[in-house]
Structure formats: C-alpha cells, structure tokens
Image (spheres, rainbow, N blue to C red):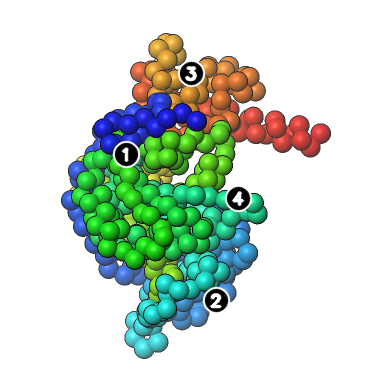
Amino acid sequence: MSATATHGSVKTFGKGGIHPGPNKGMTSGKPIEDIPPPKEVRLPLVQHLGEPATMIVKKGDLVRRGQKIADGGATGAPLHATISGKVKPLDRYPHPTLVMSQAIVITRTEGEGTEELEFPEDPAWRGVSREEALERIREAGIVGLGGAAFPTFRKLTLPEGVKLDTLILNGAECEPYLTSDYRIMLAHPVEIVEGAMVMARILGVKRAIIGVESDKPEAAAKLEAAAAGAERGDVKIEVGMCQARYPQGAERQLVHALTGRVMPARALPSAVRVLVQNVATAVAVHDAVRYRKPLLDRVVTVTGPGIREPKNVRVPIGTLLADLVAFGGGFHKGVTRVVAGGPMMGRSLPRLDIPVIKGLNGLVLLTGVSPFEGGYGPCIGCTRCVEACPLGLEPDQVSVRVEAGRQLETEPFGAIDCYECGCCTYVCPSSRPLVQFMQVAKASLRRAGELRIRK
Ligand code: SF4
Ligand code: SF4
C-alpha cells in the first residue's frame, strides 16, 4: 500500500492525471433552476446495466407524478411517473447509449386526478431498521447519480463475508464543464450528511469521508458545518479535500487520495474496505428513507459555448434533451458536438430527441473543430500518454498494435484494465484516438477470453 500523496492538507492520487481547462465558470455560479414540467417524458426501461424494469401500467392509464410505473425486479430499480399524465403504448425510442430502447411515454395532462402524490415525513425515520432503509431505497428506484447508475440498494447490500470500514461520498466532480454536484453540495449539504449517515448505518461503518476538490471551498465549508450540526451518533463524518485534478473523481483515484489505500487492478473499492457513493445519490437516499420519496428528478448541467444560457437545471427524469436546450435559450454559435455527460468520459450524441436518464449529469454543447476532424498522426513515441495514464497503462503500445490488426498482442500493455478516462487522448500531440484504440483492444481481448472459456 503506497502512502497518500498530499499537497499541504490537500490530498490526491499517485500517478498520471491531467489538468484540463475546467470551463466550470459558465455554470458554477448558477443555482439550480427547475425546468417547467415538460409536455412529455420518455422513461426508458433500461436505466442502468442489468435487468430492465417491467412496465406495470398500461396504455391509456392516467398516472400521477410519484406513482410507480415499472418494477425493477430482484436486481433492477423501479421507475416512477415523473409528470402526471396519460401513458402511451410502450414503444422503442432512442436512448443516450445510442441503442433503441423500450420506453414508457407519458403525455402531461392537468386537472382532477393528476395531482402529484405526496410524500410526508416519517417522524420515526432515523430509527428504521437496516432492512427497512434498504427497502425504501430500492422502492424509490435510486441508482448511482454520478454516472454509473448502478442500483443503490444492491451496492449497499454487501456480499457474505465482505466487511467495510469507510464510506466515501464522491463530491470531486473532476470532469471539466460540469457543476451539478457542486450546486447540489451548496444547496443540500444537510441532506448529503444525513444520507451519508443512513448509508454508514446500513453498511455498519463508523467513518464517512466526503471528498471535495480544493477549488470548491464553499461546498466544503457548507458540508463541514452540516456534519458538525448533525446527530452523528458514533459515525464520524469528515470532509476530505482533494487536489483539483482529472480524474480525481474516479473511484480508484478518490479512494487512494482519501484513505491511502490502493485498489488491486479490476477490483471494487470493497477490496480495500471502502464503498463510494456520489453526493447526489446521498440526497436521494435521504429523501427515500425520510419521506419514502422516489427518484423523480435529477440535476443536469447544460453548458458549453454552444448554448445561449448555460445553467444547472433540475429536470424530471425522461425530459427530452431538446427541452433542456430550449430552456437554456437554444443553440448559440455553430454547435459541432453534443456530449451527454462530461467531455472527457461522455458520449457524443447525433440527436436531441433522447431522454434524460437517471445517470445523466451533463449536456455539453461544443463548438469549433472536433479534435479528430483533421485526422490523426503516427505515434512519435513521446510517452506523454503513458505519463498521463492514472493506471500506468501503455496506450501508445496498444494503439500501434490495434492499427496493425494485432489486438490480441495488447494484453501485456494493459488494455483490459483501461477505464476510458481519456487522459491519454487529451495529451497526445498526434491527436491519436487512444481511448478508441483501447476500446477495440479490450473488446477483442474479452471476446478471445470468452472463446477460451467455451472451448
Ligand atoms: S502521446 Fe501520442 S504520440 Fe506520444 S507516445 Fe502516446 S500515442 Fe504516441
Ligand atoms: S483512457 Fe485508459 S489508457 Fe487512457 S489514460 Fe485512461 S485508463 Fe489510461
């Protein structure tokens, strides 16, 4: 186990990483605004990896905001109506992952019978059992809101024999442009701390650390004040300051920075007795346990030089991206790329008739020439990509072998471990699409591995 690298009291991970222009100034000063209820929401049955939800309402039903409309089964997360209205027939629509996916569409109606369901406080919420808290989290349809979107009740249900000692809340938000978590930390510090305590009790851990990058001192101060004022029992909650450095918010890097523990390759944080949850997820957990409130909305940063009024917007899940762009005043300048998520790890989208799903934290509208428009050059062997890789992989070696059609020779250079953070691509002076090369190599190695097992 290597020691935590520190810069004064500010911690960070060991090697690699980059300092991309943060571009957060467009929205960091913008408090969260509520979008007016959209005319229609599309709720894909697939919101995360794993079992899709199963529709439990039918075409023509009138549903109320807050009502469960699809069951998550044993391993998935239920879905709820995020506006009141009429259910259209189940059909296939574009999904942020660019596959077509079945979605429940609700068209908004107003008047009697369409009032939002109410979620009054359970006065005994602090005393609910671990099982009851987990059940409320499951029933609320909560998934990780930092992007990964794994069902939260499953993440909080530890396999037999696994023991943890620390919960980390991820408030690092290291992707350039995005500020939704930052604004949530400013607006809801008490709910984050309470959510952390609920999760710490479920996990049986006595220590929770909220990781915040050092360029967000106001958020850290609010969280510290909330932690100091909370009824913490025997749970110790602290705020850990991390260096503003990409990808500080990746689980592996955050765990290293805040605890000094190094996760083995391809392992989960539980291998070093830690579990990581995003700060927005903590708010949702608080709301679920205290009010039995389902996950209906999420905060999305809508930003970039291609939008007139960059904003942080709270939207009903299922709102179309086109509605988000319209709420931001529409396109500004020539938009060349629309990215769902942050520009480092997000996905370019070819269209805007795609809904916000539970894990979507940003919509970035970029202008100007895209990095690969002019093609890319040969590897000049500068090794900048190797120095930038937080995992110590060799994307240069992988890329030249993939170009030569020798994917299966990439194993020693670590393609299978790549988590696609994009640092290598960012620094390459030859503009080589190194993440894409890593993806191709990884897919080939996985296929070859599966074939070996079948034989
Ligand atoms: S940064 Fe680009 S040019 Fe430099 S070694 Fe890596 S792949 Fe080659
Ligand atoms: S994308 Fe993969 S190879 Fe490139 S820096 Fe990130 S982990 Fe390393």
Q: Tell me the CA gap for discs 3 and 2.
A: 51 Å
Q: Mark 4 Cα within 10 Å, few/some/many (few <14, many 20+)?
A: few
Q: Residue at x 35, y 34 (%)?
A: 12
Mark 1 or 4: the one toward you: 4
Task: Please determine whether, in this image, residue 276 is positioned above or below residue 143.
Answer: above
Q: Which residue is mark 3?
A: 396
Amino acid on which the number 4 mark rests in the picture: Val
3D distance between C-alphas at marks 1 and 4: 27 Å
Q: Are marks 3 and 1 in contact (CB under 8 Å)?
A: no
Between circles 2 and 1, the one closer to the viewer is: 1
The answer to whether one can see residue 400 in this image is yes
**Measuring 50% from the left and 30% from the top, which residue is drawn there?**
1
If you read the primary sequence from the N terminus, does the residue marked by circle 2 or circle 1 appear first? Answer: 2
Badge nearest the viewer, 3 or 1: 1
- Label at residue 57: 2
Kind of residue indicated by mark 2: Val
First along the sequence among labels 3 and 1: 1
Whether 64 is drawn above or below 39: the answer is below
- Rounded to the nearest angstrom, the CA distance separating label 3 from label 4 is 37 Å
Residue at 34% x, 86% y is 111
Q: Return the residue found at the far front.
A: 234
Residue 162 - label: 4
The amino acid pointed to by label 1 is Cys
Quadrant for the C terminus, please.
top right
Q: Residues within 10 Å of mark 1 (few under 14, many from 20)?
A: many
Of the image marks 2 and 4, the number of the one nearer the N terminus? 2
Q: Residues within 10 Å of mark 2 (few under 14, many from 20)?
A: some
Give yes or no for contact between labels 2 and 4 (Cβ–Cβ under 8 Å).
Answer: no
Q: Residue at x 33, y 50 (%)?
A: 238
Q: Could you tell me residue 337's position as x and y percent?
A: 34, 40
Viewer-nearest residue: 434 or 102: 434
Residue nearer the viewer, 69 or 22:
22
